[in-house]
Amino acid sequence: MSRRDRGSRRGAAAAPAPCAVTVCRGCCCGAAQVRVTGCLDACEQANVVVVQPSAAGRAAGGRPVWLGLVHDTDAVRDIAAWITAGGPGLADPPGVLDLYAFTPSRRVRQSVED
């Protein structure tokens, strides 16, 4: 979907946009839009989850958060609880998620966050 298509869809929606989550190996999460991708180009950190802020979260200063090595259900539950609470910019992540956070290269970030 092009940026133009995304922009026109934003204007048509009456409800605020929820957080978005991008995962590299599939996920089940009812609290946000989940996009499954074939590769996030950070295989050394697989399983990778990128939590992007909602429109309100971005307005409050939230930025996408990259989490790597997400292999256990407790981590998935913590991520889901954080998203339910508002996600980046609106709610502090559970402290344990700091252990999963990493910063990918600028090139990789730009391909997902744009």
Image (cartoon, grey):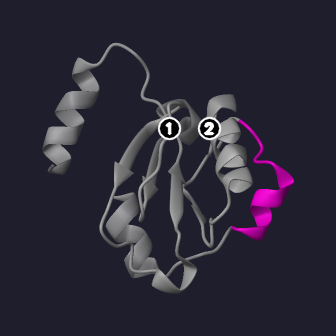
Q: Residue furthest bottom?
A: 44
The residue positioned 22% from the left and 19% from the top of the image is 12
Q: Position of residue 66 (x, y in %)?
A: 57, 64
Q: Position of residue 110 (x, y in %)?
A: 38, 69
Q: Quadrant of residue 90?
A: top right
Q: Position of residue 98 (x, y in %)?
A: 78, 64
- Residue position marked by numbered label 2 in the rendering: 83
The residue positioned 41% from the left and 56% from the top of the image is 26
Q: Nearer the viewer, residue 63 or 74?
A: 74
**As drawn, 1 above or below 110:** above
The residue positioned 53% from the left and 43% from the top of the image is 53
Q: Residue furthest front?
A: 73
Q: Quadrant of residue 95?
A: bottom right
The residue positioned 15% from the left and 49% from the top of the image is 1
**As drawn, 16 above or below 43:** above
- Residue position marked by numbered label 1 in the rendering: 19
Q: Position of residue 5 (x, y in %)?
A: 14, 40
Q: Is residue 74 left or right of residue 10?
A: right
Q: Amino acid at mark 2?
A: Ile
Q: Is residue 99 magenta?
A: yes
Q: Is residue 68 left or right of residue 34?
A: right
Of the numbered discs 2 and 1, the one sitting upstream in the chain is 1
Q: Is residue 113 left or right of residue 93?
A: left
Classify mark 1: residues with Cα within 10 Å, few (<14), some (14-19) or many (20+).
Answer: many
Q: Quadrant of residue 4?
A: top left
Report the span colored magenta. 91-100
Q: Secondary structure at mark 1?
A: loop
Q: Are marks 2 and 1 in contact (CB under 8 Å)?
A: yes
The quadrant of the rendering that contains the C terminus is bottom left
Q: Amino acid at mark 1?
A: Cys
Q: Is residue 94 magenta?
A: yes
Q: Is residue 27 left or right of residue 71?
A: left
